[in-house]
Amino acid sequence: MFVSRLTASLDLVHDPRIAGWVAEHIPGFNVRDDFGPHSSLGIGRAGEIIAGAVYNDFQPCYRSVQFSMAAISPAWACRSTIRALLDYPFRQLGVGRITTLTR
């Protein structure tokens, strides 16, 4: 696990268990393997995960990735957190599109 400070109270967490946390917090989607190959990031506060994001189905030739997210608190939603969650797909993967499916 790797943790970096985002704000005075929020951390960006790199941990392979984040995808399982996200899957458990999306109603009707509790099977970890449904994401297939993926990367994930978590947002932590006081040592607890409060939000997680999963990037899967990366299609480099189409510059596209699928994005799934879950949160248990609205405290995750600040500029530095949103910037960090979008930095990975747009800057590091170089995608031009993020797709999210919702009910």
Image: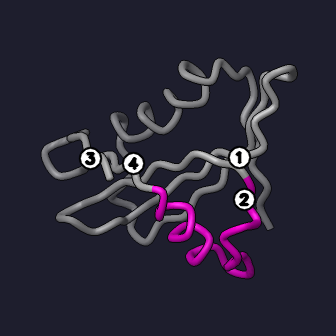
State the image quarter where residue 82 is shown: top left
* Most foreground residue, 41 or 72: 41
Q: Are marks 3 and 1 in contact (CB under 8 Å)?
A: no
Q: Residue tagged by mark 3?
A: 3
Q: CA distance from mark 4 to mark 3?
A: 6 Å
- Left or right? Give the position of 61 relative to 93: right
Q: Position of residue 35 (x, y in %)?
A: 72, 59
Circle 2: element type: helix
- Left or right? Give the position of 54 relative to 73: right
Determine which of the numbered discs, if any, sits on residue 24 in the image: none
Q: Are marks 2 and 1 in contact (CB under 8 Å)?
A: yes
Q: Position of residue 44 (x, y in %)?
A: 30, 58
Q: CA distance from mark 4 to mark 2?
A: 17 Å
Amino acid type, label 2: Phe
Q: Residue tagged by mark 4?
A: 14
Amino acid type, label 3: Val
